[in-house]
Image: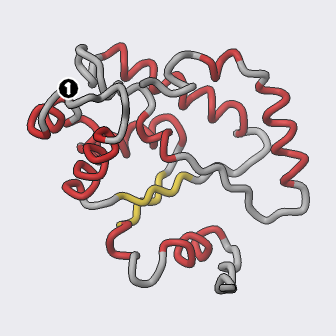
C-alpha cells in the first residue's frame, strides 16, 4: 500500500493552502511540530516485486522530501528529530503490522519480509537521505528513552514544557 506521498498526490495538493493554514495556526507558538512516522517509509512498497532501493525510488523519495522542505523552509527553522527503535524490534513491529492487513493474507514468511524490506532497516542510509534533503538530523534511541519518556525528551529538544499527567476518571 502506497502512501499519499508515494502516489504523487503531495504534488497535487494545494501547498499554499496547507502552508498558509500551518502558518496561521503557528502564530505566537515557539515551535510547530509536524510529525509523521510515514515519512520514514516514503517510497517503500511493502507488497511490491521491484527492488526497494532502486535509483528511481531513491530519486522519488528525495523529490518528495525536497518538496516538503520547500513548502516550509522560508517560514520555519526545520529540524528533523528521529526516534529509532532497535532494528530487530522495528522489523518485528512492521511484520506484525502486516499480519493485520487484508492485502497481506500471508503472502510471505518473516524471512522473505526481512530480505525484501532490508533497506528500511539500514538506518545509516535513511539518516543520510534525510540529511541530504532536509538538513541536520538529530537521532535518538526510542528504546533507551522508554523508561524516562519520549515525550519529555522531545519537549526538551524543542524547548517546550512537557504536558502534565493525564487525569484519570
Check the picture and name the quadrant holding the C terminus. bottom right
Q: Residue at x 63, y 35 (%)?
A: 69
Residue 80 placement, left or right of 103: right
Q: Quadrant of residue 14?
A: top right
Q: Residue at x 12, y 35 (%)?
A: 109
Give the answer, above or below, for where 120 lies relative to 26.
above
Q: Residue at x 32, y 60 (%)?
A: 85
Residue 11 place in picture, x, y as percent: 65, 18
Q: Residue at x 81, y 44 (%)?
A: 22
Check the picture and name the quadrant holding the N terminus. top left
Q: Quadrant of residue 125?
A: top left
Residue 80 place in picture, x, y as percent: 54, 52
Task: Decide which of 130, 33 is in the foreground and name it.
Answer: 33
* Secondary structure of residue under mark 1: loop
Task: Decide which of 116, 53 is in the foreground and name it.
Answer: 116
Residue 137 place in picture, x, y as percent: 47, 53
Q: How many marks?
A: 1
Residue 124 place in picture, x, y as percent: 28, 46
Task: Decide which of 16, 136 is in the foreground and name it.
Answer: 16
Colour scheme of the rendered structure: secondary structure
Tag 1 residue: 107
Give the answer, above or below, for where 15 lies relative to 111.
above
Mark 1 closeness class: few <14, some 14–19, many ≥20 residues within 10 Å: few
Amino acid at each position: 500500500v502506497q502512501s499519499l506521498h508515494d502516489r504523487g498526490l503531495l504534488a497535487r495538493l494545494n501547498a499554499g493552502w496547507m502552508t498558509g493554514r500551518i502558518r496561521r495556526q503557528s502564530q505566537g507558538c515557539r515551535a510547530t511540530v509536524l510529525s509523521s512516522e510515514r515519512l520514514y517509509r516514503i517510497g517503500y512498497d511493502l507488497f511490491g516485486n521491484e527492488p526497494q532501493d532502486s535509483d528511481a525510488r531513491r530519486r522519488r523519495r528525495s523529490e518528495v522530501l525536497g518538496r516538503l522542505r520547500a513548502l516550509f523552509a522560508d517560514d520555519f527553522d526545520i529540524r528533523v528529530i528521529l526516534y529509532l527503535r532497535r532494528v530487530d524490534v522495528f522489523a518485528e513491529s512492521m511484520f506484525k503490522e502486516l499480519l493485520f492487513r487484508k492485502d497481506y493474507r500471508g503472502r510471505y514468511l518473516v524471512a522473505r519480509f526481512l530480505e525484501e524490506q532490508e533497506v528500511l532497516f539500514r538506518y545509516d542510509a535513511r539518516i543520510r537521505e534525510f540529511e541530504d534533503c532536509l538538513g541536520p538530523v538529530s537521532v535518538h534511541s526510542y528504546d533507551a528513552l522508554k523508561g524516562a519518556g519520549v515525550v519529555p525528551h522531545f519537549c526538551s529538544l524543542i524547548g517546550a514544557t512537557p504536558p502534565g499527567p493525564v487525569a484519570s476518571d
